[in-house]
Image (cartoon, rainbow, N blue to C red):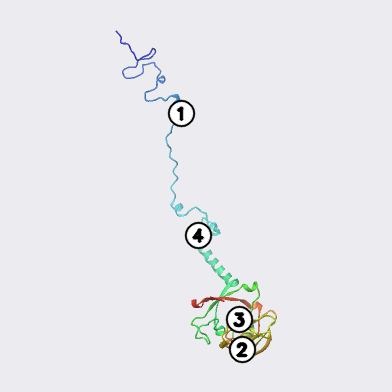
Amino acid sequence: MTEPDLGRRPGDEKPDDRGAVPEGSDATTRPDPLGWPPRQADRDAWESDELPRAWTPPPVPPEPTPRELRRPPFQSRNPVDRLTRGLPDGLRVTIDWIVTIVGAVAIVLLVKAYVINPYRIPSSSMEPTLHCAQPASGCEARFSDRVLANRFIYHLRDPRRGEIVVFETPPEAQIKCGAGGTFVKRLMGLPGETIEVRSVRGEGVVFINGKRLTESYIPSERRSLSSYDPFSPKKVPPGQFFMMGDNRTQSCDSRIWGAVPRDNLIGKVFATYWPPTRISLK
């Protein structure tokens, strides 16, 4: 008597004891209990990215070479760097230093020639306003004052009375004073004015067009009459200026060798920068 198989339906095949499908049956019609082969729904989900796929790492960039580690990407706007791009590092550094030094020297020369130039006070003609160094005659300080002159100011405006001016002396200065070249004096008379020095109570007093000139920058002991004071009225020629030193008795100036043409004016002294105790603006 055959035992009834209660778990089978008509048409089903009975597997053998090892769970194998009987020969002749279609294995694709009966999925594996573990889920393989996948169902059609699973295949559709996989193709539509509904199921996670295996993670793929991003590509690894190549290791930089030692040269790339030393030099960052070339982004300089310096024209020298652009012109020397591609040259060896040592040569590029050498060219950069040469260009820097030449540029600095050129800037200094241009500034000295057209903007500001330093000068040293060599004599006592401007004492006590500007000092010279002992033991020179009449000097009162250990160190000479060093001043700055504005070389472009007189291209913008006319010189003014009372300004301390750096200028080139006319040829008569070398003949009558034994010295010439670059002098520093105070501008006293303007073009067309009449200037004279009179003796007032033993002092040499400057008069401009018959009126006494107030000179608060000169102590009374510096106004002593010199060997060429007083002098009769002199008219300053057009385009020229009358210069005098503050130390009237020891200054060789326009009282002796005449007025200075405007073309000889170099610039206005506007500051003392040395020694440190004398730093000031004029």
Q: Nearer the viewer, mark 3 or mark 2?
A: 2
Q: Position of residue 7 (x, y in %)?
A: 35, 15
**Location of residue 21 (image quadrant):** top left
**Location of residue 165 (image quadrant):** bottom right
Residue 35 appears left or right of 258: left
What numbered label is drawn on residue 92?
A: 4
32 shown above or below 194: above
Decide: marks 4, 3 in contact (CB < 8 A)?
Answer: no
What numbered label is drawn on residue 204?
A: 2
Query: In the rendered structure, which disc, 1 or 4, sits on the residue that comes first in sequence?
Result: 1
What numbered label is drawn on residue 186?
A: 3
Residue 105 appears left or right of 58: right
| Residue position marked by numbered label 1 in the rendering | 45
Disc 4 element: helix
Query: In the rendered structure, which disc, 3 or 2, sits on the residue that comes first in sequence?
Result: 3
Decide: marks 1, 3 in contact (CB < 8 A)?
Answer: no
Q: Position of residue 153 (x, y in %)?
A: 62, 73
Decide: marks 1, 4 in contact (CB < 8 A)?
Answer: no
Disc 1 element: helix
86 shown above or below 100: above
